[in-house]
Image (cartoon, rainbow, N blue to C red):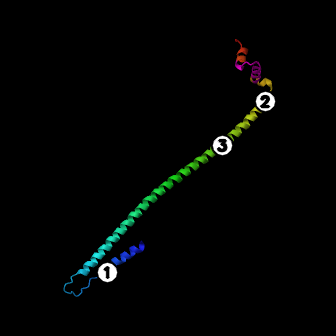
Amino acid sequence: EEAKQLALAGQRASFEGKTPTKKKRTPGKGGHSDKLVERAFADRQTRHDDAIKSLRRSHDAKLVALKASHAKELTMVTTAISLEKDQERAAAVNDALREAEKIHTERMKERTFVIEGRTPCKTPGRERAARATTDNVSPETLAQRAAPGA
């Protein structure tokens, strides 16, 4: 394409650079050769302009397609990045929750050990609950019975 354009430009320059020479006019022949040259130049110029317009249209169409493609790719990449960040955040939250659960489990084990190590006199509620389950009576009922004025 570029070679064609250069060739057309060279032809135009060669036409423009020529100066008409005066030839001997023979009877019956007018200035037909000058008109033919002008007509040929005009035809080539028209073809050249049409070729440039066609190239411009196809180039513009390619640009529109590329812009649409790039916009689509940008949207896809942006979505992928946001999903990746969301996954990273979710993984961090899950890790933190697992760690908190481990700490809670360890503390509950320590608490159970401390409670089990107490003497029965220090845990009256547990004794009442144990008696209530054996008697099949709720601790609240037992507490109401034991309260003065009941």
**Left-right relation of 80 to 45:** right
Q: Which residues are magenta?
A: 126-140
Count of marks overlaid on the render: 3
In depth, the one of 135 and 116 nearer the eye is 135
Read off the residue under disc 3: 96
Read off the residue under disc 1: 17
Q: Residues within 10 Å of mark 1 (few under 14, many from 20)?
A: few
Q: Residues within 10 Å of mark 2 (few under 14, many from 20)?
A: few
Residue 138 included in the magenta stretch of the image: yes
Mark pair 2, 1: CA separation = 113 Å
Q: Secondary structure at mark 3?
A: helix
**Left-right relation of 39 to 97:** left
Read off the residue under disc 2: 116
- Name the residue: 25% across, 80% down: 34
Mark pair 2, 3: CA separation = 30 Å
The image quadrant of residue 59 is: bottom left
Q: Secondary structure at mark 1?
A: helix
Kind of residue sitting beneath label 2 = Glu
Residue extending farthest to the front is 28
Tag nearer the camera, 2 or 1: 1
Mark pair 1, 3: CA separation = 83 Å
- Name the residue: 42% across, 74% down: 3
Q: Looking at the image, is mark 1 or mark 3 earlier in the sequence?
A: 1
- Name the residue: 28% across, 78% down: 37
Quadrant into which the N terminus falls = bottom left
Q: Where is 105 relative to 42, above or below?
A: above
